[in-house]
Image (spheres, rainbow, N blue to C red):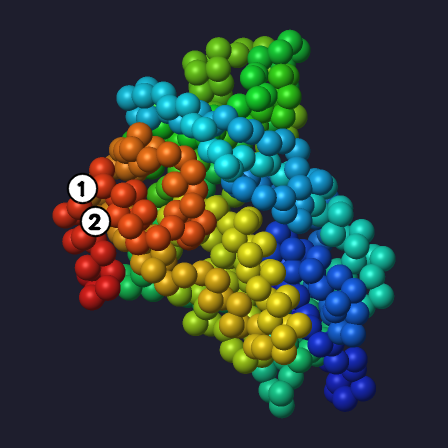
Amino acid sequence: MTTIPVFKHYTKMLIYDYIIIGAGAAGLSLADRLCDPAFAGFNILVIDKEIKTGNDRTWCSWYKKPNRYDFLAQKRWKTLHFVGPGGEHIKLDPAPYDYRMLLSAPFYHHIHDRIEKSNHVHFVKAAYFSHTQKEGRVEVLTDQGSYLCNHLFSSVFQGEIDKKKHVYTDQHFKGWVIETPTPAFDDTACTFMDFSIDQGDEVRFMYVLPHSPTKALVELAVFSTTLWSQQDYDKVVGDYIQTHLSLTDYQITETEFGIIPMTSYPFAQNNTPMVTHIGMAGGAVKASSGYAFDRIQVHSDAIAQCILKGEAPGRASRVFKRRHQLYDATLLQVLDKKRYRGADFFLTLFQRNPASRVFDFLNEETSLWEEVQLMAGSPKHIFAWSMGERVWGS
């Protein structure tokens, strides 16, 4: 059992302008912005129990333009492969987008290096326990002491999701980075989604992200409320490598595993005038797809702009559009109630729409007319029924 230490009175403690809890993708992305010279007048602290250094995550997204971390990108693809549940193959041309992959290790190293060189952003290695709001300040309790700030950014979700009120599922994934002694991959393209594996009354797909002709990440993603054993994930990944990639001679050099909540829960409601939630806790995960990294960047940019303009940082969550949150909740409702197979939905989506329109939609940049076109091939009565349940209650 962890014992919370008793701290002395903090009247002489340094009061930070901002404290960031968590040094994962969200916390470090925000810290990176706040390392910029425009924020030199603020005193900022980042708190995490560890300094991450490894490739524990692989982040991918589609982009039209250069972005802040392009120089760290491991790979870009201009050709994507989609495979439907019946083996239907679609070669996707995402132009004007390309699909980019970023490994977590260089991302962690880059931003920790910026923090180390900064005079106004600092890092403390400490386990976060809790925070309290009082007397116009936020007190953060950790195993290394108590810290005060004017505003807290937290990537820790401390609430409880009412799963009777809010539709909820998990995206859980397990992947292997494998290397082969001879070229085995076309690294000019990636397998974006392959639904040809057994669906098992869930939403399951594989993706293959080649680093080079002899190295690739092969990963399984599952949308369901039931997590698997590690052995079960490994069996599906191993079988896919043997049967779909026709490989038996390879070495596993890295593995990754994660769980991403996909829910209609309105995370922004937990923000207060002194506490803004970020990352998953701030609603940055796209509920219908599980993509989060690019949305974290959009949210981080919006928070930075709020600070510079003297606005409440919590207002940055407006970048997540309510109309699209309803679309996300509707799809989750359809999948949760098993009214339409997820594999069939994605197959129809990519069969009847250019990839660029789908990516515009996932980026929440489409017009209402484009959204009507996107949904043209889906069973309208099922989606209308499910949307009504989300609006008026199921």
Cβ–Cβ below 8 Å for labels 1 and 2?
yes
Q: What residue is shown at x 40% (from left), y 65% (from top)?
A: 266
Which amino acid type corresponds to the residue marked 2 in the rendered image?
Phe
- Residue visible at 66% across and 37% down in the picture: 73
Residue 98 position, x and y percent, is: 54, 35
Residue 256 x %, y %: 57, 36
Q: Nearer the viewer, residue 191 or 142?
A: 191
Of residues 290 and 362, which is closer to you in this image?
362
**Mark-to-mark CA distance, 1 and 2:** 7 Å
In the displayed structure, 182 sits above or below 151; it is above
Number of dots carrying numbers? 2
Residue at 60% x, 60% y: name it. 300
Q: Is residue 161 visible?
A: no
Q: Which mark is residue 379?
A: 1
Q: Quadrant of residue 341?
A: top left
Question: Could you say which is closer to the camera, residue 108 or residue 236?
Answer: 108
Residue 131 occupies quadrant: bottom right
Neighbourhood count class around disc 1 (C-alpha, 10 Å): few under 14, some 14–19, many 20 upward: few
Left or right: 353, with 298 as reference point: left
Q: Which image quarter is the N terminus in?
A: bottom right
User: Which amino acid type is shown beneath numbered disc 1?
Assistant: Pro
Would residue 133 be visible to someone looking at this image?
yes
**x and y percent of residue 375 in the render?**
26, 43
Query: Can you name the residue that lies furthest to the left here?
Result: 381
Which residue position holds label 2?
Answer: 383
In the drawing, does residue 22 fall left or right of residue 388? right
SS class of the residue under badge 2?
Answer: helix
Q: Residue at x 55, y 56 (%)?
A: 298
